[in-house]
Image (spheres, grey):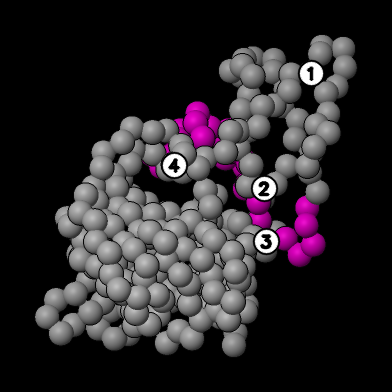
Amino acid sequence: MEVASEALDFDFEIVSNDSQVSKQTEAAYTQDLSEPLRPGSCIVLRGTVRPQCKRFAVNLLYVRGHKTDIVFHFNPRLALRYIVRNSRFNNSWGEEESTSVEKFHLNRNKTFELQIVTTDHEFLAALDGRHICAYVHRTSLEKVNKIEVEDIDVQGIEVFQQIKSYHSVDGAIDVESLNQQQVEAYPLVSSRQNPFMVPMAASDGDTFINQQLVVPVTAQLPTSLKPGCQLEIMGRVKILPSAFYINLQDGNTLWPHPMIPLHLNPRFCK
C-alpha cells in the first residue's frame, strides 16, 4: 500500500454553487456532492471546537445503496493531540496514518479552517492555511459522492463549484460553513503565508537571521542560484529525530508539485 511521503518518512505506530442551510442536529450531517471530485477540487470547512470535544471526524464517503465506504477519514483526537487518517472499505478499516508536518494546534473553544484539496494522487489537508498532511488515494477519487461531518450541530452548509486562479464520536465541533470549489494550486493563496526572504550576504561578511523560523518554512531566494553561489542553512536537530529534509525548488506550492533539482533528506532511523 502506498502512503504519503511524510507518513513514509516519519510515521510511528500508535499504541493504545448550491447553498443549503440545515437545522441543527446532533446526528452526523451528510451532504451529496453536486458533482464528482477531481484534481483541483477543494473542500473548505470552518467550525469551532466545542468545550468538551475529545475528537471529531470529517469523512469523504462512497455511498451506493445500503453500503457506505469511507474513502478519506480525517479524525482529530484532541486528548492525544494527533490526527488519524484512514479508509474503510467493506466495513474493514485499513492502516492508520497519524504523523504530521505541523504541530497539533486544534484547541477547544477555538475556531479553525480545514482545507482538503484533491490531486490525481492524494488528498492534501491544511489547518488554518498551513499544510499538515497528505493522504494517498486508496480508491478512485471519482467514487466520492458525499461529505460527512460526525456528531455536530450544523448551522449552515453550502456546496459549490467555482473555478479560481490562485497561486463514535463524543466530542463535537460547530460548523460555520462548508464549501466546495475548484482550485489550481495548494496551499491556497488566500491562506498561504508570504515566504521568508533569504538575506543576501555581503562579499566580505556574513548575514545572520535574527528571527526564529517555524518549520516547515518556505524561503525565497533574492536571486536565482548561479555558479559560485553559496547557501548556508544553520539549525538545531531536535531530540530523538526521525528525519528532516531541505528542498531547492522552483516554487512554493505543494500541488502542482514543483521541480526539485536538489532534495536532501537525512534519516536518523536508517
Which comes before the other along the chain, label 1 or label 2? 1
Q: Residue furthest front?
A: 23
Inter-mark Cα distance, 4 to 3: 29 Å
Q: Which of the two discs, 2 and 4, labels the residue nearer the N terminus?
A: 4
Q: How many residues crowd mark 2 within 10 Å: few (<14), some (14–19), many (20+)?
A: few
Q: Amino acid at mark 2?
A: Val
Query: Mark 4 belongs to which amino acid?
Result: Leu
Circle 3 — which element?
A: loop
Tell me, yes or no, if residue 98 can be seen here.
no
- Amino acid type at image mark 1: Ala
Residue depicted at 76% across the width and 65% down the height: 240
Q: CA distance from mark 3 to mark 2?
A: 15 Å
Mark in the foreground, 3 or 2: 2
As for residue 243 lying within the magenta part, the answer is yes
Residue that badge 3 annotates = 242
Stretch of the chain drawn in magenta: 237-265
Magenta: main secondary structure equals: loop
> Contact, CB < 8 Å: mark 1 with mark 2?
no
Quadrant of image for the N terminus: bottom left
Answer whether residue 209 is visible to the viewer in this image. yes
Can you tell which mark lies on residue 53?
A: none
- Residue furthest to the right in view is 205
Marks 1/4: CA distance?
32 Å
Considering only order in the chain, which callout, 2 or 3, is on the residue closer to the N terminus? Answer: 2
Nearer the viewer's eye, disc 4 or disc 3? 4
Indicate left or right for 175 with 235 as reference: left
Callout 4 secondary element: loop
Q: Residue 188's mark? A: 4
